Amino acid sequence: MTGKRARVPAAVLLIAPSLVVMTALFAWPLVVGVGQAFSGPDGPTLGYVRRMLDDPYFWPAVRNTGLLIVVLIPIQFAFALTMALLLRERPRLAGLHFYVWVIPLAISDLAAGLVWLSVFADRGYLNSVLDHLGVDGYAWLSYQNTTTMFLAVVVAELWRSTSLVLVIVVAGLQGIPKDYDEAAAVFGATYWQRLRHVVLPQLRPSLQVALILRTILALETFAVAQALTGRSLPLLVGETYQWYNVLQNPNVATAIALVVLAVSMLAAAGYLRLLRDRTAAR
Amino acid sequence: MTNRIKLHSGLSRRGLLGLGLGVAAAPALTACGGVSTSGADGGEGSVNFLSTQFTQVEERQRFEKILGDRVTGQKVAFNAVDPSAFATTVQSQVDAGKVQLSLVGGLHGELAPHASRLADLDDLLGSLGDRGFATDLTDLAKLSGGTTKYVPWMQATYVLAVNKKALQWLPSGADVQKLSYDQLLSWLTAARQANGNKPVFGIPAGPKGLYHRFFQGFLLPSFTGGQVTTFRSPDAVTAWQYMKQLWAQTVPASTNYDGMQEPLQRGEVLVAWDHVARLRDAPGDKPDDWVMVPAPSGPKGLGYMLVVAGLGIPDGAPEADRAKAVVTALTTADVQVDVLRQNAFFPVTNAQLPTDLPGAVSLEAAAVKAQQEAANAIVSLPPVGVGARDGEVSQIFKNAFKEICLDGKPVQGVLDAQATQLNVILDELKVACWRPDPAGSPCRVA
């Protein structure tokens, strides 16, 4: 009997390592984080959350982060899909194109931010080109020009992170058997009809993964925006950095981080629901 | 071609985040250094000297050379650490009764929390009567108690750097050495009009700029006579309304400037306010084209911020007598001038300045002296006793600037909201007010 009780099911043994890792690296920090955000030296408090909400940078940061996701992700997916479909047509030097397009994936966020800073800075490449053309330069990244500042971040992020979506979509496309597409073509479907009714539905799992990944990563946009705009265009993760590092208040920093976490989880759950395959019989 | 060169300056203005990350890592590394060397380094009979100043490698090496050359007779093991490592080291060693440090050096605000852990130095200060310390400084060194807790070591402040090109627009009757804030504004307004509508004035309002010290130590004390207690008073509203007008005559790119010497060198700015160490290279090799002048005066007087560092001896220091000898050596005229020449901190004594100082340094020395000796001077200190919360306290002043000057929100509303925030921080800290506010405890916005 004792021998029987000591037997742990194989499944538990198999998932034990990942459980330990998840607990140590995710669950425990999460618990500590919640504790840090909601308790001060005098016990539980909402003081840190209130300070976060009262901070003049918080709501602009929420707005900018939200706006960035709404603007960035559709453009990014349109680009990535177009690029992937172009590659699918097997043009000459397709391999080379693919490698060139995924180069940004290999570049660090910060380096990308600094490269784009050298483009958009007051005396950067863009203004130099304008100057050569006889047009007066423009302070793209000035706090007075919020729109161009935002657009600069969108362009930089678009350049930097579209390749991630591209890689996922290309991988997804390669997994789709050609037969369906050819069959549809035989029956006289146009390119758009085949794209709409044959390719995209089969791409759904890849798109779902890419959407979740990209939305979470867009919520965490930090280094690119930090390099380009500093705190002139506050974003949520930039604010956690500001509170933790510059203002040295880890409690408020954690409170903001928890907001990012909550929104990420909501977004992931939302996508999973939204892109659920309703045809699949369960 | 020129664009390429300019481009680099544009890059460096953002402080190159990479560098920023390096800076972020540095305290961690220096903290390790402090812990590992505070006990073992010097060995028997040497003076372990822990300092929050000269943490930067070059500054530290130059200061160690001064120590080696000028402080003969004593072996000094100099360690420079960041303020939080300093605070924990001093606190833990003295409170545990295992003191290995014999000498500590830090800014007034960094020494103040350790008043009870520092030995009385009245006798030492008395023996240094010939040094000619300003009474302002020796009063501060009492740390609000009755006895001297540190000996003044060196000082710095903030002044205005003026390119002589801008002097032509000075309003008639105004003396650039004794400006009022109103004269400054009409001068800058006239200069802007004459300069093709391009502003000539700049402040270091970038991410790593020290512009909050302008509000804390210059603008608000000059207009309100206080820094914290008067934060939302009617006088403060006047001050911020003035600031709004001043900002309208300020180069908008100021929000990118971490220090003013580069924009001054490039000619983007002709008149700028900044820390003396961050203005030192502005004149370059043409000091004759520049003047450095004291900050302007407001309705209440000439508010200026004094950054003063002092030397203290912890209670129970193993080599207290040798440490006193080191303090004596560090306050001699030769060492004071060496430190000025090498590391741009100004003498706290009446040391005669030699005539062969670098051009910019002697310009600054004149301005620092004039500012300190002004009859209507109001001395302010950077927040005292707030430790690591200095960033948060200062952020309140930056927030007020952002909301009032950049976002154009109504002054009183912003001040009320920020005062509430400031009181939240101060209520947690429960510290006494620092100059120029009356020393009431705990410090709060009225």
Image (cartoon, grey):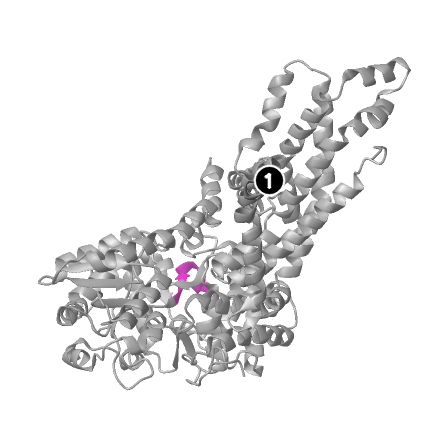
Q: Quadrant where the C terminus of chain A lies?
A: top right
Specify whether residue B105 is painted magenta: no
Report the side of B333 relative to A13 (left or right): left
The mark total stands at: 1
Residue designated by label 1: A12
Residue A93: quadrant of the picture: top right
Q: Position of residue A182 (x, y in %)?
A: 83, 14
Q: Amino acid at mark 1?
A: Val
What residue lies at 62% left-to-right and 21% top-to-bottom? A97
A39, B345: nearer the viewer: A39
Q: Residue furthest right?
A: A187
Picture residue at 64% right of the left edge, 56% below the top: A259
Which image quadrant is residue A234 in?
A: bottom right
Q: With B426 as the anchor, is B98 left or right in this view?
A: left
Relative to residue B82, is residue B131 depicted above or below?
Answer: below
Quarter of the view holding residue B272: bottom left
Residue A152 horizontal/vertical position (percent): 63, 43
Q: Secondary structure at mark 1?
A: helix
The reply, left or right, for residue A174 in relation to residue B252 is: right
Is residue B129 positioned above or below A181 on the image? below
Is residue B169 one of those drawn in magenta?
Answer: yes
Q: Can residue B170 be seen?
A: no
Q: Looking at the rendering, in which quadrant would you find the N terminus of chain A?
A: top right
Mark 1 crowd level (few <14, some 14–19, many ≥20, 10 Å Cα): few
The answer to whether any part of residue B430 appears in the image is: yes
First to last magenta residue range: B159-171
Depicted B380 relative to depicted A176: above or below: below
